[in-house]
Amino acid sequence: MKRGLVAFLALATVVLVAVAWLQSGGLRQHAMFSAVTPEEAVQALMSEIQAHNYQQAYASLDRSSDTDLASFIRDVAGSDGSLRTYSSLQAAEVSPLHADRDQALVRVRMNWSSAVGSLDDVRDLRVRRDGSVWRVVWPKLALPTVPLQVVAVNYLSWDVIGRNTSQNWGAQDVDSPKVRITSMNAIARPGRVVILGEVENEDTVPAYLNVNATLLKADGSPIEEEGSFDLISHVLLPKQVSPYRIDFPGVRMDAVKSVRMDARALLVPASADPVISVSDQALSKDGLNRNVLKGELVNQSGRPVNIAQVLAAYYDNSGKVIWVSDGYVDQALMPQVPVPFAVDIPDDIAAGLKNYRVIVNHYSRLSN
Amino acid sequence: MKRAFSSDLALCRRLAGLALLCFLPGWARAAELQVPALVEAGQAFSIPLGGSGQATFYLLGPDHVVKRTVNLGSDLEIVSSDVRSAGRYQVILCDTSCTSATFEVRAAQPAHLSFFLHPSRVPVSTPDSIDASAFVFDQYFNLVLTPAAVDFRVTPASGAGFSQRASTRQGVTWMRMNSTPHEGPVRVTAVLGNVDEARVVQQVAGEACRLSMKAVVSGNRVTLETDPVRDCSGNALPDGTVVSFTKLDNAGKSTVDTPIKKGIARMDFSLHGRAQISVACGVVLGNEVALNGKL
């Protein structure tokens, strides 16, 4: 009886320890440290990143990785209020590119869910054999060093003093900014109608802008009304031009007789700072063989820009806007540091485009 | 809230009763009421009442009702505050029977101007771009429907001012004018007798004109700087206006939207071989600069 109790207690202890080990990710860790193929190694690393176990993920890296824990976390989890800091890894597709006995190259397509939708991050990772297991070699995040300097920011900013509600009828108020839709094009895309074009702030004050479109039937009755949502630069400085795109999913072009456009502008406080340059723009293919417009963003001010969105307008031979695409940059734009971006272009649009123009929307937590 | 509701209810009941009183068939006529046909707003007057004893007097105006017990055989005083609103009034006097009369209250002398000047900003040299409308009211804010002459005095920041007189029709008059070629505030004052109201319209620079830039190369960088950006009338575009620089070289295309600062826009680019650089402001294109590849 006494022996039976001892045996039972010992068995129960072993079972509980095993359960605790499993619950604490021991199985996954075991899988990671016993990754027998390069793909398994990358997949295990992605699992740790997905679970926000950055220390364990870092511990699983190959020793030849020239990154440190802080840089690794900065790379995968984001920093400085960037979009990546508001994102989480949703899924990772791993595909081998090349492998030999001791080294392999594995492509991973990370799909991050964020407040502005899903974002793809495609990386080619080097994986090395370490005894019986494979480990990922994580490159150090290359951050260009910027010379110490004082950046004088003396761009104009605008404040608005509105009308006092206690004033009599007829008291003077400040008019809304004057904006103009300079071009509009309606195109049929698979499963939808798209209205796109450009709009200009013709005024001498900043404008907060919304462009809406209503599709009309032959009898003048509306089919549907939509706004440009985030496919526009909402804040336009004087004489600034923004592309816009309005999607009408589920609408067929042959049902549309005409389009009613409506650009509404509000006078808002704004700042001309920061200036963001878009350099080295070029059309190319990405790792997944998609047509993309690539380039670099450079924040020319002295303050970080937390979240940046790239808006690109594409033109045909006649200068007509044939497509507008956008992409969010998941890194913060630190002063003077180039940050790469890429926005998708549909294949048929890429074949017919002659020119393009890129502008940048930005959001900064410290903006005033 | 409840009290206000009950007071509204009481007023409604009173008005309904009065309306019924007005339209009762077989209306019995008491003493004739002699009221002036036309009264100026806010002007007190009296109505002589014949007979003797007491009667109930009602005054029904456009925005209020008065009920009073009066002594017949004396003058009924209508005080100034009872006839402040322009419109049609009805007086009813009831003792054993009722009698009524109507009179009109017209706006008093002009005392207030409501002045609209639109827009608040206007590009220079734009025809028929400024609208000025003046509404004339008396001291009780009744619209004065009799014609009155309003002077619109226009005082630009630079250059000679002018004045234009216009007569009101149905209480309103307006003027339309061109913006002048020079930027700056334009003060427009509507004047009627000793009453005046002033508004300001800001004339702003129009589209950029003859936009041009120059390039200064230093090593593998180029500094681009526009000439002072002005419109076709020579007015400087305001600081903060966006100027777009576009560079095309071996590294691809680079674009910057940069605001004008102190009248000019400036930008630095790195160079990679031959470069073609253009400048634009809104929909206005400027000159192009070609740089050779010896950089």
Image (tube, coloured by chain):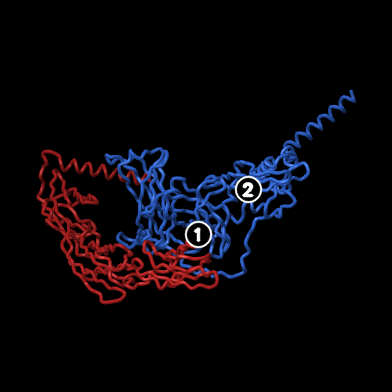
Chain colours: A blue, B red
Q: Are marks 1 and 2 in contact (CB under 8 Å)?
A: no
Asked whether, in this view, residue B226 is left or right of residue A70, the answer is left
- x, y percent for residue A189: 41, 42
Residue assigned mark 1: B252
Depth check: give the residue in front, B212 or B186.
B212
Depth check: give the residue in front, B274 or A9.
B274
Position of residue B170 relative to residue B239, above or below, is above
Mark 2 secondary-structure assignment: strand
The residue under the point 52% across, 66% down is: B271
- x, y percent for residue B17: 22, 41
Name the kind of residue labelled 2 in the image.
Answer: Asp
The crowd level at tag 2 (other Cα within 10 Å; few <14, some 14-19, many 20+) is some
Chain letter behind tag 1: B
Residue assigned mark 2: A124
The crowd level at tag 1 (other Cα within 10 Å; few <14, some 14-19, many 20+) is some
Residue A197 seen by the camera: yes
